[in-house]
Image (cartoon, rainbow, N blue to C red):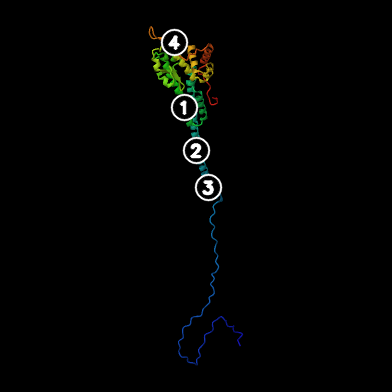
Amino acid sequence: MTDPLQPAPDPSAPPPPASPTPAQDVPPQYVPPQAPPPQYLAPQVAPLQYVPPAPEPPRRPLGLIVAVVLLSLGLAGAAGALVWYVLQLEEAKATIVENERRIEEQQEYVDRKDTFSASMQGLLEEVKTYEGLPFATLVSWDHLQTLAAQGWARRWDADALETTIASVEDARAELAERRAAAEAEASVDATGNPYETHLDALGAGYATWVRDDADALCASDVLACVMSDDPLLVHVDAADDAAPWMTDWIRTGLAYHEFAHVLQFTNPVETESALLAFAGDHERMADCFALTYLDGWTLDHRVWVSSFEYWDVEVGYGYVCDDRQRTTVRAWRDGLGITMRPIGAGVSG
């Protein structure tokens, strides 16, 4: 029975050491060392300490922040404006360059058109020097109209217009050269031959002659002839021209006859209607021209080569035209002559 006055033993306390019994002798024995019993330590808890809160970082003034933001925005805006301005400058520069190119191009067009107009005017002035000449085919009005139409159609194509300008200049130069040659021919009677004398007078130097094998060229036995592909040149047969019966009077009549052929070939439209009076016979019409315009001319000639020898020469085709036909020939000749016509892009040929 426990003493109620004694405290109760702590069950978790280690037991008290046993005390030896004094009456027993215990022989010595090896007792291995005993590991100390485990001890359970209560956890050490550090006492609570007051830790002051970390100081807040210093705040910038709100006005400064706003100023910085506004400054940044301003710098960004300024940079953007600068870039925009530079781009605008580049665009403006490109526009200026393009406009200058267009102006130069347009100026080139204007210059070319002015050059074409001047060239065309020069051509028409040269044509005007031919006015009144009885050789209609000397001036090709269809060609002039084509050049004018080309100039209008090519007014926005400088290279093509330049080609047309060159064609206009070529046409003017050709007419000028022909006119100069005719004037030189008419100014001098180099041979004194009746062919030259009368053809120069009748044709103002534009109708010329040459002594050659007219029989071969015209494929016929002729004293002289004119070919349609070269209507301003009279071919005189050299053999016949050297014949003993040939005279200057006969040469004169032949010059008139052949000049009629020159007029026929260079005025085909007018000639077509006049030929109706001669049943379409060019030779009879040419004989009539000589009989009408050369006083004293006949188709039959007696040529004395000595006091007792002569040749009876028949020139022409044996038909003597009547007064009605001579009137037709006069009206035909009087109606010939180059007259100026309007030329332009809107003019029908």
- Label 2 belongs to which residue? 94
Q: Which secondary structure, mark 2? A: helix
Q: Gap in Å between the C-alphas at discs 1 and 4?
A: 51 Å
User: For this rendering, which residue is in front, 144 or 277?
Assistant: 277
Q: Gap in Å between the C-alphas at discs 4 and 3?
A: 122 Å
Q: Earlier in the sequence, mark 4 or mark 3?
A: 3
**In x, y percent, where is residue 43?**
54, 73
Residue at the far front in the pictured view: 308
Callout 4 amino acid: His
Contact check, label 4 and label 2, Cβ < 8 Å = no
Callout 3 amino acid: Ser
User: For this rendering, which residue is in front, 173 or 223?
Assistant: 223
- Label 3 belongs to which residue? 72
Q: Image check: 337 left or right of 181? A: right
Q: Earlier in the sequence, mark 1 or mark 4?
A: 1
Q: Quadrant of the N terminus?
A: bottom right
**What label does residue 39 carry, if any?**
none
User: For this rendering, which residue is in front, 154 or 203?
Assistant: 203
Q: Quadrant of residue 11?
A: bottom right
Q: Gap in Å between the C-alphas at discs 3 and 1?
A: 71 Å
Q: Which of marks 1 and 2 is nearer the N terminus?
A: 2
Given this view, does label 3 or label 2 mark the residue nearer the observer?
A: 2
**What label does residue 301 carry, if any?**
4
Q: Residues within 10 Å of mark 4 (few under 14, many from 20)?
A: some
296 relative to 109, above or below: above
